[in-house]
């Protein structure tokens, strides 16, 4: 019995070492934090036609639970516009806005096996995202005629509304010499449903306002907090 115990102990240690080495060879490290800067192109869906596209700047801070499951806080600063005072019903506005958004993001790589398929490897960085946010708008110019048609042209110059951000996109990952995703290019389309009808400075109709947004920009991995993923990130 005494001779058997060392052999059993040695066998256990050997198996543990093999498992550890196999795990180390099949997983990759990644940084937990990203900081990003993106350009946005906004279109308001409110009470005015024609719709117009206006610019915005988006700053993001991302916590990566895994390389493919992300939690993002973002700040948007920009302009909104819509309508034409020369086109019926002659509603027109321009405004400045700030949005503050917290959202979760799930990339396909979290749940698909992309290790042996070029197609799956290509789509692993597609993502869907949703969360909650808050938008503040300040009307800088508007056409109103309350004395003639108060129900059509009523509204306020300041708006503070909760919003629901919904987004789809693709994240191009670029890897450093240690095969960590250190630089990313993010391309997305989102719709922000606003829980109110004064985003554009008009109270009109039965539907709440909202705005869509195309965005493109870059994200950089920062900090010393490093995690290890259960499988290879880069193939």
Image (cartoon, helix red, strand yellow):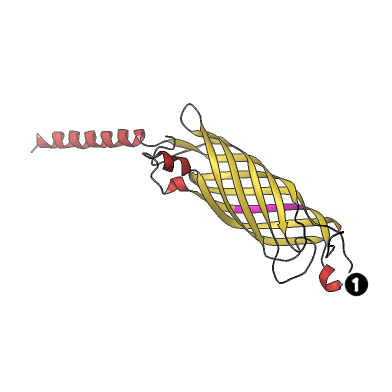
Question: Which percent across, then down, holds residue 140?
Answer: 85, 54
Extreme top residue here? 177
Q: Main secondary structure of the magenta part?
A: strand
Is 107 placed above or below 198 here? above
Question: Which percent across, then down, holds residue 105?
Answer: 53, 50
Is 1 placed above or below 101 here? above
Is 32 placed above or below 176 here? below
Is 100 within the magenta?
yes
Question: Which percent across, then down, holds residue 107?
Answer: 49, 47
Neighbourhood count class around disc 1 (C-alpha, 10 Å): few under 14, some 14–19, many 20 upward = few
Q: Which residue is mark 1?
A: 148
Can residue 50 be seen here? Answer: yes
The residue shown at (84%, 68%) is 153
In depth, the one of 64 and 141 nearer the eye is 141
The residue range painted magenta reads: 97-102
Q: Which image quarter holds the N terminus?
A: top left
Is 205 within the magenta?
no
In depth, the one of 98 and 210 nearer the eye is 210
Judged left or right of residue 14, residue 200 is right
The residue shown at (35%, 33%) is 25
In depth, the one of 165 and 190 nearer the eye is 190
The residue shown at (82%, 66%) is 155
Q: Quadrant of residue 23?
A: top left
In depth, the one of 110 and 2 nearer the eye is 110
Extreme left residue here? 1
Judged left or right of residue 180, residue 9 is left
Question: Which percent across, then down, holds residue 91?
Answer: 83, 62
Judged left or right of residue 111, residue 78 is right
Can residue 154 be seen here? Answer: no
Q: Which image quarter holds the C terminus?
A: top left
């Amino acid at each position: 019995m005494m001779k058997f115990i060392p052999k059993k102990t040695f066998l256990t240690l050997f198996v543990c070492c093999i498992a550890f080495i196999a795990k180390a060879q099949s997983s990759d490290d990644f940084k937990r934090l990203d900081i990003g800067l993106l350009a946005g192109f906004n279109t308001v869906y409110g009470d005015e036609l024609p719709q117009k596209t206006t610019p915005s700047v988006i700053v993001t801070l991302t916590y990566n639970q895994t390389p493919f499951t992300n939690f993002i806080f973002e700040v948007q600063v920009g302009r909104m516009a819509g309508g034409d005072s020369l086109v019926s019903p002659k509603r027109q506005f321009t405004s400045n806005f700030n949005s503050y958004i917290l959202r979760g993001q799930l990339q396909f790589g979290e749940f698909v096996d992309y290790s042996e398929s070029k197609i799956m490897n290509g789509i692993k960085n597609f993502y869907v995202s949703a969360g909650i946010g808050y938008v503040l708008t300040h009307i800088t110019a508007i056409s109103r005629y309350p004395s003639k048609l108060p129900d059509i042209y009523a509204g306020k110059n300041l708006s503070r509304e909760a919003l629901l951000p919904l987004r789809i996109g693709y994240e191009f990952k670029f890897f450093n010499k240690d095969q960590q995703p250190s630089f990313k290019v993010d391309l997305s389309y989102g719709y922000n449903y606003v829980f109110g009808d004064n985003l554009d400075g008009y109270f009109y109709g039965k539907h709440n306002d909202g705005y869509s947004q195309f965005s493109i920009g870059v994200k950089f991995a920062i900090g010393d907090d490093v995690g290890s993923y259960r499988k290879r990130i880069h193939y």
